[in-house]
């Protein structure tokens, strides 16, 4: 039996940055109640002082099996009791909701959940209106942006959500991307370790709590950025290529994005700080049970470095995959939808081999089975088929296809994200004392992964929001706002 590594991910200098972290607003989990008359309040359908959810099938995020016939009691913004129906004391005057036939899981925590969106035809948009509604309405109650294009738009949106005026998830802000090399780019091109440190200090002061390195980052700049970030009390993740997973672990990185297809550990003859041209081919052909892959896993596990799964965005580039979800098509603006369907028709003819995708899924399962901390995010970029929220739900289905049991997938989508963000004391599982972030869905999720799409109510801070109405309000808007 494998012993799971579920400890906090930390760094030696972490304590040095606690005051800076709190000053930036990260980790402040004060209740986000909807302001009267606001857009957020318009979606609130359960806002009682005490609420009891009875008769549910509960998958609590701990990794343990589903529990049937359970009652969850909420007072204010916290869960106060969880137990068998009829054995839990329900406060007098509580709103009792009979949810027989429903499944409850913790609010999902998306670790690669941008607030911008890219699509076929070169389209791009900052989804200030639709992304927060899609995330919250789909059951994603906390996100990390994992790379910003309009960081001040995201900081301002976070403030509006925290004030209770705008509906949406908790937002952990990642600074603009950092990379290196020439060419035209909207990313910050780091030219020296000193510039890297200056960049980190600036964005930590502005309220970012994560930094993201991109594919052509160099060792000296990444090393300096990680060191400075840890001094400032923030963390670093990366979409890597020029630096391999094991090399990044040795530098002290906290999290690595995307899994197998971005790992240059398996590219023979690669030079220092070189992003191999055949990265995908090299990576996806590796034996996930072989010594090379296992060495990567062990290095990450020993250092407490998590991996973020983003299967929903990679699926879009694979031949013959079921990536024409009607809900997503309806949410797209007409022009985005037309270009996406045209792109998908081409991919079904000339896209990547489905066997490569199966190997990428197996890589993540092998990492998890070895004791690694696997979290999840949608990454709503690429050709536009992975939408905020809907793509997070698709990750549940894909991880199930990869062989994860329902309770394991829920742990990946909730508790492990909370561990990476250092909010596990308050979020990630359904247990007494934690914040009441819950997803209610119609049906038995243990019997059918597609039930993840049947969200009826999403509780955030003990307030229940009307998921179908929230999602209906974004139809035709993705790609515009």
Image (cartoon, rainbow, N blue to C red):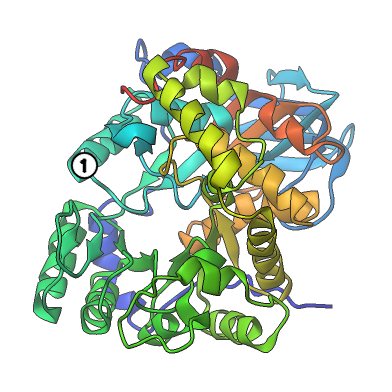
- Quickly name the residue at label 1: 150
Q: Secondary structure at mark 1?
A: loop
Q: Answer with left or right where residue 211 lies relative to residue 392.
A: left
272 is higher (above) or lower (below) than 327: below
Q: Residue at image x 85%, y 23%?
A: 100
The quadrant of the picture occupied by the C terminus is top left
At which x and y percent is residue 190? 15, 70
Q: Is residue 64 visible?
A: yes
Relative to 25, is 301 above or below?
below
Count numbered badges in the picture. Answer: 1
Q: Quadrant of residue 412?
A: bottom right
Residue 392 or residue 383, whichever sits in front: 383
Residue for point 49% across, 15% down: 43
Q: Is residue 155 left or right of residue 374?
A: left
> Residue 458 placed where, x, y %?
59, 28
Residue 12: give x, y in percent of width and height: 38, 84
Dividing the picture into quadrants, the one containing residue 424 is bottom right
Q: Quadrant of the N terminus?
A: bottom right
Q: Residue furthest front?
A: 349
* Residue plotted at (64% across, 61% down): 356
Give the side of residue 245 with respect to residue 56, left or right.
left
Circle 1 Cα neighbour tier, 10 Å, few/some/many (<14 / 14–19 / ≥20): few
| Residue drawn at x 35%, y 74% as measured from the top left | 275
User: Is residue 392 visible to the viewer in this orientation of the structure?
Assistant: no
Q: Nearer the viewer, residue 342 or 205?
A: 342
């Amino acid at each position: 039996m494998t012993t799971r590594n579920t400890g906090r991910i930390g760094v030696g200098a972490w304590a040095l940055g606690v005051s800076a972290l709190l000053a930036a607003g990260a980790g402040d989990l004060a209740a986000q109640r909807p302001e009267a008359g606001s857009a957020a309040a318009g979606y609130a359908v359960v806002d009682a002082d005490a609420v009891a959810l009875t008769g549910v099938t509960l998958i609590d995020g701990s990794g343990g099996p589903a529990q049937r016939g359970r009652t969850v009691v909420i007072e204010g913004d916290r869960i106060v009791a969880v137990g068998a129906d009829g054995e839990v004391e329900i406060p007098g005057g509580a709103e009792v909701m009979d949810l027989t036939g429903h499944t409850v899981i913790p609010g999902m925590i998306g670790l690669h959940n941008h607030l911008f969106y890219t699509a076929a035809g070169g389209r791009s948009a900052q989804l200030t209106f639709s992304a927060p509604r899609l995330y919250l309405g789909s059951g994603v109650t906390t996100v990390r942006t994992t790379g910003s294009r309009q960081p001040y738009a995201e900081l301002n949106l976070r403030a509006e959500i925290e004030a209770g005026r705008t509906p949406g998830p908790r937002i952990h802000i990642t600074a603009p991307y950092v990379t290196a090399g020439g060419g035209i780019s909207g990313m910050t091109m780091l030219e020296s370790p000193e510039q890297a440190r200056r960049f980190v200090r600036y964005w930590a002061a502005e309220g970012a709590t994560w930094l993201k390195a991109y594919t052509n980052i160099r060792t000296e700049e990444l090393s300096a950025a990680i060191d400075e970030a840890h001094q400032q009390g923030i963390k670093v993740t990366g979409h890597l290529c020029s630096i391999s997973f094991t090399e990044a672990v040795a530098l002290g990185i906290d999290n690595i994005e995307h899994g197998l297809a971005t790992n240059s550990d398996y590219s023979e003859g690669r030079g220092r700080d070189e992003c191999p041209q055949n990265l995908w081919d090299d990576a996806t052909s590796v034996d996930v049970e072989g010594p090379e892959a296992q060495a990567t896993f062990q290095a990450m596990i020993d250092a407490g470095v998590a991996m973020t799964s983003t299967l929903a965005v990679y699926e879009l580039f694979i031949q013959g995959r079921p990536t024409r979800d009607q809900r997503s098509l309806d949410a797209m603006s007409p022009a985005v939808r037309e270009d996406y369907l045209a792109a998908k028709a081409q991919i079904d003819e000339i896209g990547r081999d489905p066997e490569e995708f199966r190997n990428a899924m197996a890589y993540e399962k092998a990492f998890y089975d070895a004791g690694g901390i696997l979290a999840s995010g949608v990454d709503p970029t690429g050709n536009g088929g992975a939408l905020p929220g809907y793509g997070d739900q698709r990750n549940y289905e894909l991880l199930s296809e990869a062989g994860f049991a329902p309770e394991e997938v829920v742990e990946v989508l909730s508790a492990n994200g909370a561990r990476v963000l250092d909010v596990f004391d308050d979020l990630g599982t359904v247990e007494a004392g934690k914040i009441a972030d819950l997803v209610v869905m119609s049906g038995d999720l243990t019997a059918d992964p597609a039930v993840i799409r049947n969200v009826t109510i999403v509780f955030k801070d003990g307030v229940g929001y009307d998921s179908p109405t929230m999602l209906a309000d974004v139809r035709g808007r993705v790609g515009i706002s």
